[in-house]
Amino acid sequence: MNEKLVILAAGLSSRMKKSISSKGVSSEAIQQANQISKGLIGLGKNKRPLLDYLINNARVSGYKSIYLIIGEDSKLFKKTYSNNPNFSDLSISFAIQYIPEHRIKPLGTADALVQVMEQYPELKKTSFSVCNSDNLYSVNALSKLREDPATNSFIAYDAKHLKFPEDRLSSFAVTILDNQNKLLNIIEKPKKEEIDSFRDKHGVIRVSMNIFSFKGDQLYKYVKSCPIHKERNEKELPIAVLNMIKDFPGSMQGIPMAEHVPDLTSKDDIIEIEKYLGEF
């Protein structure tokens, strides 16, 4: 059974650093948001990093090995999670997403998976899950993903249960599934006026929050050969997934879920995540 979770944490947190907070965000949180990676911002009563909560949920869900994909200068990740006594029962490894010489930003999520699979070749031969470091996925979602028997799968969230303003949905990825919940298409950052047209036969808009499970030997070819997106200038995992299901129709199983996923994109999201944490 799948016991490996890859967490994408090499992004530069550009939108977080550029965002302007409204009242309610502490000066300490604002300072952290401007200086460190989003996943390391202290949250909740104990001011633990968001990543602590995510890794703990992964542990409760049955994952045993965590692979953190970080940037070349991400010493704070290693300082925080190397031999961390809170996670002594887990194997936590670090993969570096190196930036090509001609770029100033990482080459994207598909490239991140290429680099972790090449640095840890066992991932090419087994199943593993992958998710963002700035979303707090639930134990329920992580467990269902880990236990799903399909070769490849992802959580397909009901947009109605995501507690985001309607206009924010256009910043996520809308998915199209068939009657067996097999993935047919991913529409990244759809236009606001188009979103309603993507409802399924039950009237549900299904959203991907970038949480997948893959069979490494099937995925590797597609992340390795993933083209650079013309507009965003990155190699994006959804494009690799679409290329894979084009060659192997029905190979990506959607797991419907109706719950919220806290998302840490801007400074104002800090308030919402702390409210969410306070509910538990």
Image (spheres, rainbow, N blue to C red):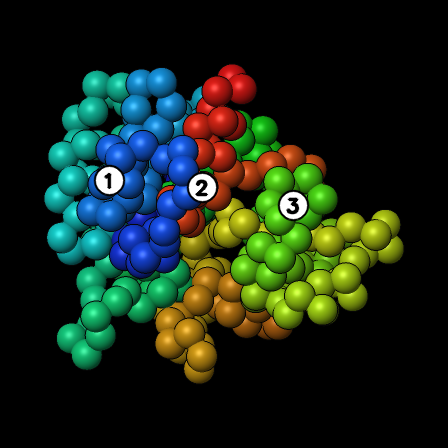
Mark 2–mark 3 contact, CB under 8 Å? no
The x, y position of residue 10, in whole percent, is: 28, 53
Q: Name the element at disc 2.
A: helix
Mark number, residue 147: none
Q: Nearer the viewer, mark 1 or mark 3?
A: 1
Label of residue 157 in the image = 3
Residue in the image at 13% along x and 44% along y: 75
Give the mark nearest the N terminus, 2 or 3. 3
Q: What amino acid type should be assigned to the residue bearing mark 1?
A: Gln
Q: CA distance from mark 1 to mark 3?
A: 30 Å
Marks 1 and 3 in Cβ contact (< 8 Å): no
> Which type of secondary structure does the marked residue at label 3 adopt?
strand
Q: Residues within 10 Å of mark 2 (few under 14, many from 20)?
A: some
Coordinates of residue 78 in the picture (x, y in percent): 16, 38
Residue pointed to by mark 2:
269
Quadrant of the image occupied by residue 157? top right
- Image point 21% across, 19% down: which residue? 85
Which mark is in front, 2 or 3? Answer: 2
**Number of other residues with Cα within 10 Å of mark 3, as a class: few under 14, some 14 to 19, many 20 or more:** many
Return the x and y of residue 223 as percentages of the image width and height. 41, 66
- Horizontal side of 57 relative to 32 (left or right) equals right
- Left or right of 147: which side holds 110? left
In the picture of the structure, the residue carrying the numbered disc 1 is: 32
Q: Could you tell me the amino acid type at mark 2?
A: Asp
